Amino acid sequence: MGSANYEIVGKNYSEFRQPDPRISSLISSYLESAKSIVNIGAGTGSYEPTGKIVSAVEPSEMMIAQREEKPNTVVYQASAESLPFNSNSHDAALAILTIHHWENWKKGLSEAYRVARDKIVLLTWLGMPQKFWLYDYIPELSSVDKDLFPSLEDITSILGQVQVINVPIPHDCTDGFLCAYWARPEMYLNSRVRSAISSFSRIADVSLGLNKLSSDIQNGEWRRKYGHLLAHKEFDFGYRLIVGKKNA
Ligand SMILES: C[S@@+](CC[C@H](N)C(=O)[O-])C[C@H]1O[C@@H](n2cnc3c(N)ncnc32)[C@H](O)[C@@H]1O
């Protein structure tokens, strides 16, 4: 399976993928001691902490074009697999929802480990603790993601011992990744919303599942089956912050 083409997938990114403030504070809390950060697969610059020296690494022009100028930040059009920095050149390496897109995640993670002096902070997905209701409508989504994301064992094979922190997804999450709309099912019916979620770009035709979702929302079936979820303010969908310490 090839990596998603962000020259196409990235078109509506900044409109629907605004950093979520709660996830942002969690990430920042693990970067407090770092003065310099390399943000790998930086996209449009979401989750880059302020008040630090930042090197943002991003291969896609479409994504770079959507960045806002930020002080103390230099953008490098480059890939994770070959970082244009000396070893131990940054206090921390950050990679948010990106390692599953890398052509060679082993090489990319080894590069992150090489250029970080102190720690490596990743946000990734380690599999659903329980089935996501959207898979009932579009079962292909389940296999697409399972095949794509490195496992915890994969990650520790490069980073060594790591800390794993749960990242529950708020019911009103502002960063529109796949599970972000778990409490707002109607959002998946919007093609512009789906266009900012790379998993959808890997499936040829989702119309059957979306037609069923649309009628279930209208006739109350979605609420009967999954409405109990709406009692939650946040939910665990398997997103995890992984913090590796160098010289731990
Ligand atoms: C889902 S976006 C995440 C962007 C950003 N980190 C965020 O949290 O919004 C994935 C990003 O990974 C980038 N990417 C894909 N292949 C890459 C590679 N080999 N090296 C670095 N970044 C890559 C894509 O261009 C895209 O910007």
Image (cartoon, grey):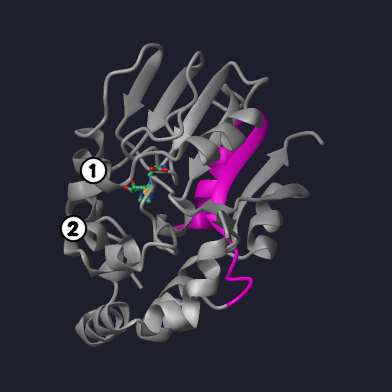
138 sits left or right of 245 in the view: left
- What amino acid is labelled 1 in the image? Glu
Q: Quadrant of residue 140?
A: bottom left
Residue 141 can be seen in this image: yes
Above or below residue 240? Residue 226 is below
Cα distance in 3D space between marks 1 and 2: 9 Å
Q: Position of residue 131 (x, y in %)?
A: 55, 78
Closer to us: 169 or 142? 169
Q: Residue furthest right?
A: 248
Residue under circle 2?
Answer: 192
Residue 3 can be seen in this image: no
Residue under circle 1?
Answer: 15
- Dot 1 and dot 2 residues touching (CB under 8 Å): yes
Q: Is mark 1 within 8 Å of ligand 1?
A: no
- What amino acid is labelled 2 in the image? Arg
Closer to us: 186 or 25? 186
* Other-residue count near label 2 (Cα within 10 Å), few / some / many at <14 / 14–19 / ≥20: some
Q: Quadrant of residue 112?
A: top right
Closer to us: 247 or 68? 68
